[in-house]
Amino acid sequence: MTARYTHGYGAAVLDSHRARTAANSAAHLLPHLEPGMRLLDVGSGAGTITADLARFVGPARCTALEVSEHAAALTRAELDRQGLAEVTVLVGDAQALDLPDDAVDVVHAHQVLQHLPHPVAALAEFRRVCRPGGLVAVRDSDYAGFRWFPEEPAWDRWLDLYQQAAAANSGHPDAGRRLLAWAHAAGFENVEATSSTWCHATPPAREAWAATWAGRLREGPFGEQLRGTGWAEAEEVEGLAAAVTAWAADPDGWFSVLHGEIVARA
């Protein structure tokens, strides 16, 4: 039931993911958290959001889940770096959790469902392991809703290629708009749906956004997939990376990243 992770775990990906915090990536959940809650963070990745959530509920009350030992080691390293070794880090499949019913009070997943072949199955599992009345909080991008200025053909081409690659990997690059429907399909009745954006409009933010995608094009599974399938030749891939990097230098540059969010009551 697992899928190929389109982004991989290269430096360009991790540098971007380490900038994520509970404040900039889980604001829809934070008002609902209380100390002592048992929290499961699914798809903990670089570990920075996990660390923030662990401080809200208490490190010993927090469990992180990743799909492989390699990914779990990245989470553990960040938690150790922040002095949060009490957090439990597990390896498993979000679509078939090896946890008992009613095991936690909160399940959180950030940018996870878009990469799964069976997101409704994952949400049903989140509901199963969450106690009655507990919360399931999910946030996912909606790539078709991304917008940028000035117009740059390289971004248009990048978006087309990314959507093609994600779909070929059994992913759902428009997951953000589907979260409410998926939650209903998984059996949730009480669901609050919202949306939010990241806006990259300062020189450092533009540079970081362009750098992460230029890096993913040049190295790692996304660029390898494009070249290996013949969807884009190596020369075009390098040209796209150079063009988005140049775009970031424009003082008028602006890039908005759309996310869908839900907070569902189990």
Image (spheres, rainbow, N blue to C red):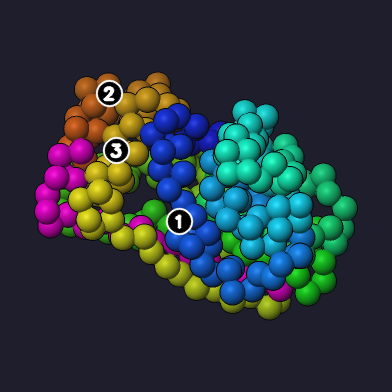
Task: Name the residue type under label 2.
Answer: Glu
Indicate which disc, 1 or 3, sits on the residue closer to the N terminus. Answer: 1
Mark 3: secondary structure: helix
Q: Please state the extent of the stretch shown in magenta in the rendering.
A: 245-265
Identify the residue at image location x=63%, y=31%: 73
**Cα distance between the residues tagged 2 and 3:** 20 Å
The local crowd at label 1, few if under 14, some if 14 to 19, many if 20 or more residues have their Cα within 10 Å, is: many
- Residue nearest the observer in this picture, 249 or 76: 76
**Where is residue 195, by image quadrant?**
bottom left
| Vertical order, 257 against 90 (above or below) | below
Q: Are marks 2 and 3 in contact (CB under 8 Å)?
A: no
Say left or right for 53 vs 214.
right
Q: Which residue is mark 1?
A: 141
Q: Are marks 2 and 1 in contact (CB under 8 Å)?
A: no
Task: Nearest to the eye among marks 2 and 1: give it.
Answer: 1
Task: Name the residue type under label 3.
Answer: Ala
Say left or right for 227 vs 100.
left
